[in-house]
């Protein structure tokens, strides 16, 4: 396994407060704006949402890999994230990111293992580990009997 990977994106403004960001390798462009609270337009992704969204996407991908490796079956996973942007001495920065996964499983007997795997995913998510903000995991686990086929 390699010790280093590189991910390349480009961004450019298309209007005064809007632009597009694209990933290398043909990834679809994503239109963004400065946030409305900083004179941007509503209805577009903001860089702040992209950062918080990256934490959510990373958690989902990390949990899926851990669950697969652990042969842990689950019915669904939905992750909500909330980033807290605070103004300090050096300006604004994210000070906290809340990660709120809702994991649905089929058996109550899997609850403890599910929680351990959620915690492992939080520790393993490289986006969260790369942020200086405090990361707070707030998991919820639902038990739903699997549908009979």
Image: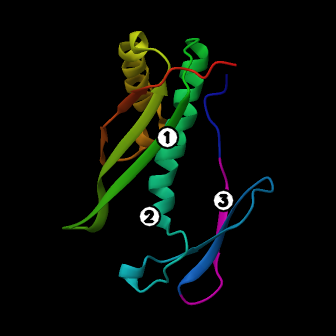
- Would residue 113 be counted in the magenta stretch? no
Q: Please say if 109 is above or below 3.
A: above
Question: Is 10 part of what is drawn in magenta?
Answer: yes
Q: Position of residue 136 (x, y in %)?
A: 29, 40
Q: Secondary structure at mark 1?
A: strand
Seen as rendered, the residue at the extreme left is 89
Q: What is the residue that sits farthest to the bottom in this orientation?
A: 16
Residue 78: mark in rendering: 1
How crowded pointer 1 is (Cα within 10 Å; few <14, some 14-19, many 20+) is rated as some
- Residue 29 occupies which quadrant of the picture? bottom right
Q: Residue 63: where, in percent of width, then height?
A: 52, 28
Nearer the camera: disc 3 or disc 2: 2
Q: Tell me which segment is drawn in magenta.
A: 7-16
* Residue drawn where x is 29% and y is 68% of the image: 92
Q: State left or right for residue 49 relative to residue 30.
A: left
Tell me residue 137's x, y (percent): 32, 36
Q: Which mark is residue 9?
A: 3
* Quadrant position of residue 27: bottom right
In front of the other: 149 or 24: 149
Left or right of residue 17: residue 30: right
Name of the residue lying farthest toward the right: 26
Q: Residue at x 40, y 9 (%)?
A: 109
Q: Which mark is residue 48?
A: 2
Q: CA gap, disc 3 to disc 2?
A: 16 Å
């Amino acid at each position: 396994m390699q010790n280093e990977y590189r991910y390349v994106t480009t961004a450019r403004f298309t209007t005064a407060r809007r632009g597009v960001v694209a990933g290398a390798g043909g990834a679809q462009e994503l239109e963004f704006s400065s946030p409305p609270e900083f004179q941007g337009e509503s209805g577009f992704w903001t860089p702040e949402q992209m950062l918080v969204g990256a934490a959510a996407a990373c958690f989902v991908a990390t949990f899926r890999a851990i669950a697969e490796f652990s042969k842990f079956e689950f019915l669904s996973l939905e992750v909500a994230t909330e980033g807290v942007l605070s103004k300090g001495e050096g300006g604004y920065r994210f000070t906290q990111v809340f990660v709120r996964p809702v994991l649905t499983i089929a058996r109550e007997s899997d609850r403890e293992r599910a929680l351990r795997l959620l915690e492992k995913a939080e520790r393993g998510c490289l986006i969260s580990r790369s942020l200086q903000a405090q990361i707070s995991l707030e998991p919820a686990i639902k038990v739903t009997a699997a549908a009979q086929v």
